[in-house]
Amino acid sequence: MEFKFGGSSTNQKTVLGHPSGLFVLFFTEMWERFSYYGMRALLVLFLVSSIMDEGWGWERADALVLYGWYTGLVYITPIIGGFIADKFVGYRRAVVLGAFIMTLGHASMALEGFTPIFFYVGLTFLIIGNGLFKPNISSMVGQLYKTQGKEKDAGYTIFYMGINSGAFLGILLCGYIGENIGWHYGFGLAGVFMFLGMLQFYFTQSIFGKIGLSPKQIEDFDDVVEDGIEKIGDNIEDVIEEAESSIVVKDRLIVIGIFSLFVVFFWWAFEQAGGSMTVFAADYTDRALVGNAALTFKIVNTIITVVPMLVITWVLVLLFRKTFSKFALANTFLGISFIIIWGIVIWMLKREFKMDATEVPASWFSVLNSLFIILFAPLFSKIWQSKYNPSGPMKFAIGLLLVGLGFAALAYGSASIPDGAKTASVSLMFLVIAYYLHTMGELCVSPVGLSYVSKLAPMKLVGLMFGVWFTANFIANLLGGITGSYIDPISEEYGLSTFFLIFTIIPIVAAIIMMLLNPMMKRKMHGVR
């Protein structure tokens, strides 16, 4: 009997219409993103905080440059990690090794109080570990699906919801603990869940069948029935590959290249979230709340924390129903991680309600991005499966347009700030609007981009092409950090509004160009949608 999805027979059991293995990857990626975004939310704030506040007292420009290098390098190492997995160790081993190295990285950063060396060693481990982890878990998602159409797009969007569930929790909890309890506690907490996520993945590997194994492991795979079925599939793929002319492969690689180029403009602007937008939140936004305003924020914060937690827990229960009998140990590790998370969430909310006044943490605004993704990813997934599904280039164009409009809101909101001012009290609603528009744009670009790389790349180059895709993110993050470091000189001479207008105009121009390229790119996809 031929399976509908890739992987083992257990993987044919569906959760929300998708293979169970997708949600194993969902939770593994969720905890990895918890660790990454939790640390990312704290990095600039920690560096610019005064020594009295246990920070390093760096200048904004220096902190933003380091932020750019860090967030950039975690996207350049995947090209090496993708190659290593493709040729030698396989996707699964690369994911486990990468997760373990990142766990060590967080442990090292938690010790930064003893000597700065631990901080830099930790950053290095996080960069290396991410290179092994990031491209290879994304590659495994694509191989769960045997079709190349709307179903895979929807699967990547669900996977992207897992990414942002982790980002949401990481920013919320690591950010809160780092700002209110101690920076090293925030850094260390991220590593705890990275370790639990690694264990959950390690003990559930057999659900993927041959997916993610190294070439040598595939040769030794002893499941005869599945081996016979997959060999038939491999032979069919070989015939198709031979039938495809080199021009088709070349055209599709050109399309990946164009997508990779334009995604630079998107992430260059979008990744100001952890840099200049965090500076704006910390120094230029009115975050002090008292009386009814404080109570309202506490209630809203409780709702936006508990509701997503309930949704994610519900998905966890659905996965348990399908896989617990087969993978009890892995599911136990996953369950323990959720018990700990719920405990921290309840403690945080109770602590806040005991306080009369509230100062919204500067890192809290980054939570909005992840929250909006959790809320709207299922809607976008349905749209991509409907007749209203636009082409890939048009999705990119819409995403670029929306990120530009988000910065237009910040430019408008900061128009009243005097040139060169170091502090101000702008309404926090401008940041809320910006994060909402940026998130809608992100849903049009990032998960769709992952899906198109998977569909357009030749099978033997999938891991490498994901590495190329993440290289574009490296360029974007590095340029974003360097550009963000000019926030002070630009705002002193031209005003903070002008600084944000730079990030308004360039993405909108890129969106217009992408719209014009749409017909040509659709032709070069040769039927891939």
Image (spheres, rainbow, N blue to C red):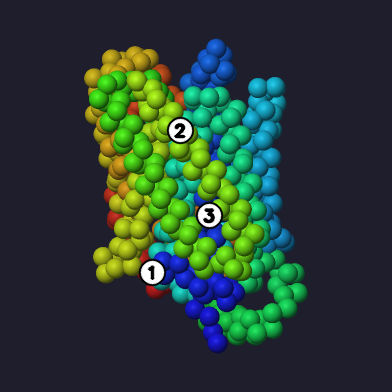
Q: Secondary structure at mark 2?
A: helix
- Point out the frontmost of discs 2 and 1: 2
- Give, as a three-letter code, the residue at label 1: Lys
Percent position of residue 178, x then y: 52, 28
Q: In which quarter of the view is residue 237 placed?
A: bottom right
Figure check: 154 above or below 199: below
Q: Position of residue 172 (x, y in %)?
A: 45, 36
**Residue 67 position within the rendered picture, expressed as x and y whole percent measured from the top left:** 53, 31
Is residue 261 placed above or below 485 in the rendered structure?
below
Residue 348's label in the rendered image is: 2
Q: Secondary structure at mark 3?
A: helix
Report whether 467 appears left or right of 221.
left
Q: Is residue 384 left or right of residue 21?
A: left
| Residue hosting label 3 | 27
Left or right, 435 with respect to 209, comes to left
The residue depicted at 70 percent of the width and 72 percent of the height is 218
Q: Quadrant of the N terminus?
A: bottom right
* N-term mark: 3 or 2: 3
Quadrant where the image shows the C terminus: bottom left
Q: Which mark is residue 150?
A: 1
Judged from the image, the secondary structure of the residue bearing numbered disc 1 is helix
Q: Can you see residue 332?
A: yes
- The label nearer to you, 1 versus 3, is 3
- The residue closer to the viewer here, 12 or 148, is 12
Query: Residue at horizontal 57%, vertical 39%?
Result: 190
Quick one: label 2, few (<14), some, or many (20+) residues within 10 Å? some
